[in-house]
Amino acid sequence: MATDPSSAWAAELTHRVREGFIRTVISTSALTALFFVAYFWVQRHPAYAPWVMPRTQLDLMIPFQPVAILAYLSVWVYIGVGPGLQRTAAEFAVYGLWLCGLCLTGLVIFYLWPTQIPPLTLAATDFPGFGMLRRVDETSNACPSMHVAVAIFTAVRIDQLLRTLRTPLRLRLLNAIWVTLIAYSTLAIKQHVALDVVAGALLGLVFARMSLRWRPGLIHEARFATLPLPS
């Protein structure tokens, strides 16, 4: 019996979300906590004095926009989408190992080549979240932006999955818009400069492309390649 392309992708995504939700929440929460322990240790114990990242013309053109913190903080939801859509425990584990490798690489860079953003005088704001952000996250560990690195990694992996499952174009556009807003938010709330974003994007892209070269699940995904594109 022929498979209806308008429902095959939806059924597959629903199955993946339902089956992987619990393991995704538990695993990503635990790994995020471990990452921050290492992140803050490196931030306070760099191997050398931090190097100040230069501002570019783009940095000067983008004003301070407190509302962008909403997109900035949404990365912690966004990065859970990638592993949450992996179909099997093996796919989930391999995805997590690549993501851990990405984060570990970033931490090594922060330790051996510590960087910080230039001192800025920002407009006072009582927008929710900024008080905690400024108390917790200092201006160091700047380049590469790990916010952007993990977001780009996630975006590439999600886009690859959506293309394989032949989902409607609107889902891929939503994915592209979300990652773009996250990257922009790092500049708009002045947590990073443009060079941090470029370096983070390159780091995330390198690991995303490597992760696509070796991963389980290729045989299962191949069956969707023969389905017609949804209207």
Image: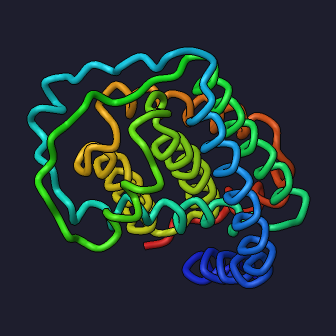
> On the rendered structure, is 29 left or right of 180?
right
Residue at position x 33%, y 30% from top?
117
Q: How many marks?
A: 0
> On the rendered structure, is 12 left or right of 68?
right
Nearer-the-camera pick, 120 or 10 = 120
> On the rendered structure, is 115 left or right of 109?
left
Percent across and percent down for residue 102 are 67, 37
Q: Quadrant of the N terminus?
A: bottom right
Nearer-the-camera pick, 224 or 48 = 48
Q: Is residue 57 above or below residue 66?
A: above
Residue at position x 65%, y 32% from top?
107
Q: Is residue 109 above or below residue 132?
A: above
Nearer-the-camera pick, 199 or 108 = 108
The chosen color scheme is: rainbow
Q: Quadrant of residue 23?
A: bottom right
Residue at position x 22%, y 65% from top?
67
Nearer-the-camera pick, 194 or 129 = 129
Residue at position x 77%, y 75% from top?
20
Percent across and percent down for residue 213 are 75, 34
Q: Quadrant of the C terminus?
A: bottom left
Percent across and percent down for residue 113 are 55, 17
Percent across and percent down for residue 169 are 41, 63
